[in-house]
Image: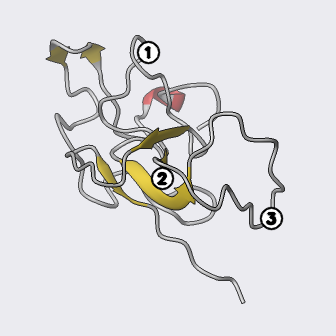
Amino acid sequence: MGEELTPRGRHRCNVWQGTFPTHNTEADGYLGTAPVKSFRPNAFGLYNVSGNVWEWCADWFAADRAPLPDHDPIGPAEGTTRVIKGGSYLCHDSYCNRYRVGARSNNTPDSSTGNMGFRVAADPA
């Protein structure tokens, strides 16, 4: 997506449009979650990895983590919160401003909410 939220005037992900948290204009077509394949895939053919829902990852969260390798990064062996990535339909410039695949936050493993899903990974071998 680069630096623009709407490159060439097109919405590329589902995030909050309007005044957060009182008025979502639905300019991207959705008030809440968008169905999979509502937006074009990225260059890897993956859908909805930015916006729509935060995606749970298996990694434990560490706020002060050292830079990780690009290939198969491994986080801490244990923790109290898990990593979530990608942002959600509740992200807005005034709130979390995370419209990137690598956007990273955390939440407790027992949490459930309408703006979180799962990030599925495959072993390329």
Local crowd size for mark 1, using a 10 Å CA cut-off: few (<14), some (14–19), many (≥20): some
Residue in the picture at 33% in, 44% down: 52
Residue in the picture at 30% in, 36% down: 89
Q: Report which residue position mark 2 lands on.
A: 49
In the drawing, does residue 57 fall left or right of residue 107? right
Point out the frontmost of discs 3 and 1: 3
Q: Is residue 81 above or below residue 73?
A: above
Q: Report which residue position mark 3 lands on.
A: 71
The amino acid type of the residue labelled 1 equals: Asp
Rendered image: mark on residue 93: 1
Q: Nearer the viewer, residue 43 or 70?
A: 70
In the drawing, does residue 47 fall left or right of residue 69? left
Q: Is residue 21 above or below residue 11?
A: above
The amino acid type of the residue labelled 3 equals: His
Local crowd size for mark 3, using a 10 Å CA cut-off: few (<14), some (14–19), many (≥20): few
Locate residue 67: give its quadrant: top right
Q: Nearer the viewer, residue 47 or 114?
A: 114
